[in-house]
Amino acid sequence: DKDPVWLKDKGDMFFKRHDFTAAIAAYAKALKADPDFLMGKLNRATCFIMVRGFGACAEDCDDIMRQIEGLKPEEFEADKDFYNKVKARALVKRGAANAWMSNFDEAIADFTKVLAEEELNRHLGPHDVTALARDLAVVKNRQESQAVKHKGDALFYQEKYDEAVAKYEEALEVDKENEYAIANIGVVHLKKQEHAKALECSSRALRLIDNF
């Protein structure tokens, strides 16, 4: 059980069964045997996303990018298609992880890089490229919506509750699924002892989170 390829394949089997914790353990053993095993690291990053370990996913993808970018030119050229394929997937996964962590600038940079460079996006295929472009638009909307929501937070802390709600509603005009803005409207209702409205907002926010 020290062969990294065998351990990676075992991780893949666990992944297909949706046993992501076991898959992560198998990939970790593969990487202990071969710390430079790119596919083991890439697949573990995918599992980390599935268990919402977004920071760990980003770290694995950072390692992948450092490893590829540290190759000598002749090493990279010798297997260029493979390295570009891994690079494209690592950028997409890191972008997704950063989006989940509200690191919007980093997520936008990674998604944009993949979409802009044909040598990267051709490894994703037309369907995934279209989906990535859609995801990029969603992240940009969330970034804009959160910026407005933060203005609402500032008003909330000043106890200007009606003005805060107006900002939260403005944030929802940009991103109608901004669960943070919805939840905060619920908090305002709770402050006003409008319990039914608070419960409605909280339930709506939880439904959005459950559907992620």
Image: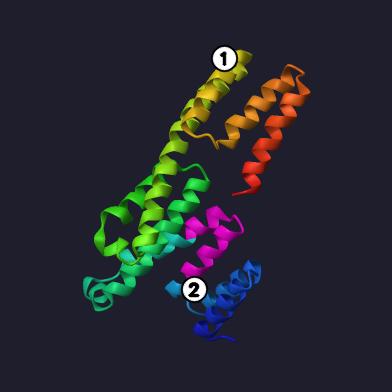
**Which of the 4 image quarters holds residue 25?**
bottom right
Q: Examine the rendered structure and indicate whether residue 145 appears above or below residue 82.
A: above
Callout 2 amino acid: Gly
* Residue that label 1 marks: 163
Q: Which mark is residue 171?
A: none
Q: Quadrant of the N terminus?
A: bottom right
Callout 1 amino acid: Glu
The residue that appears at 25% across and 78% down in the rendered structure is 78
* Residue that label 2 marks: 40
50 magenta-colored:
yes
* Image color mode: rainbow
- Does residue 136 appear in the picture of this structure? yes
Q: Examine the rendered structure and indicate whether residue 147 appears above or below residue 207.
A: above
The residue that appears at 48% across and 26% down in the rendered structure is 148
Looking at the magenta stretch, what is its main secondary structure?
helix
> In terms of secondary structure, where does tag 2 sit?
helix
62 magenta-colored:
no
Q: Position of residue 69 (x, y in %)?
A: 31, 64
- Range shown magenta: 40-59
Q: Position of residue 52 (x, y in %)?
A: 59, 55
